[in-house]
Image: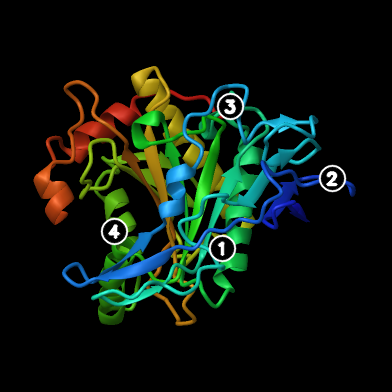
Amino acid sequence: MFKRHLTKPDGRSLWLYARQPIPDGLAAPSPSAQPVAANSHLRWHPLRGEWIAYASHRQHRTFLPPPEWNPLAVTTDAAAPTEVPAGPWEVAVFENLFPTLTGLAHDPPESIVETRPGRGACEVVVFTQDPTASLGRLPLDRIALIIDVWADRYEALGARDDVDYVFPFENRGVEVGVTLHHPHGQIYAYPFVPPVAARELEQQKAFHDARGRGLLEDLLTREVADAARRVIYRGEHVLALVPVCARYPYEVWVAPMRPAPSLAALTSAERQDFARALKTVILKYDGLWQRPFPYIMAFHQAPTDGRPHPEAHVHVEFYPAYRMPNRLKYLAGSESGAGAFTADTLPEEKAKELAAVEVAID
């Protein structure tokens, strides 16, 4: 993998990645030359025991721009408002113009609850220069390159003093709030371990301390031993399945069988198999519904808080993004207000439907 760092006129960083060398002389564009003035802050939620981020400058972010103004479009027109340059790159990463978290955050307002600067980072990951593509439709080698990029950003962001957790994710579809249709994901680098990851790690640590092995490793082994009823992809290194404890219909987890703590810890062979698993899952989603399936794809991996985390086991969790007639459900009071889910379908049923979808992997 080759990588080149550029600085935008407004001061933000841009990283270009490719399988081949990236030439000198590429210029990093930005919609404006004015420095980014984002300044977010955190407030402590005493009842939930978690930090809430406040970033009012995001009210002015790009929302469903007209086709002639796509910030992720590649253009040679110096006057065009774009974020990525023309050139032989394959994947691009740049600092978000409207970040929820930023290393520039300072002087949080005083409040009746504890406040902190909203330090950290928010990055955009452009998967391809083709605006009509999607993650699942990309060649396997490109998806593997994207995994390499996620791993590289995990190490780079995790090395920062203001980052305790690196969270790559993709929101796909307007149903989940996507405002730019060019295929891309994001990375949030938090100054704390976010609540869902913290809860998972708490359970993993208790299991690891008691039994000397990983909780997710144990669960994956038992899933395979249970006649693989909920497994929809089984490669040499990686498993994809509708977990026995799925909270959503069509929820899917993708994980290496080996308890690697992060994407950066995966071997080359594991990354290739992970790419095949991701492609298989997304194509099955699209094939089942005969349309681009809206989802949230969330990576869970070891914190970068300077402490050892032998309990952590990197994995992806896919969640459906919205209700489809007679199949999915809205998140109502119990789910949204209490975090207690009521599932209207069985994981085995949904796994059977997804497993039946034939997909071709080039």
Number of numbered discs present?
A: 4
> Circle 2 sits on which residue?
26
Residue 141: quadrant of the picture: top right
Q: Which residue is mark 3?
A: 133
Identity, as a three-letter code, of the amino acid under mark 1: Tyr
* Quadrant location, the C terminus: top right
**Of pointers 3 and 1, the one earlier in the residue sequence:** 3
Q: Residue at x 14, y 52 (%)?
A: 337
**Residue with the mark numbered 1:** 154
In the foreground, 87 or 230: 87
Do the residues under discs 1 and 4 have CB atoms within 8 angstroms? no
Label 2, label 4: how many angstroms apart (C-alpha)? 47 Å
Q: Work out whether residue 340 can be spotted.
A: no
Query: Is residue 66 in view from this perspective?
Result: yes
Please say if 325 is above or below 64.
above
Mark 4 closeness class: few <14, some 14–19, many ≥20 residues within 10 Å: some
Label 3 and label 4: CA atoms lie apart by: 34 Å
- Along the horizontal axis of the image, is 104 left or right of 209? right
Question: Label 1 to label 4, Cα distance in Å?
Answer: 25 Å
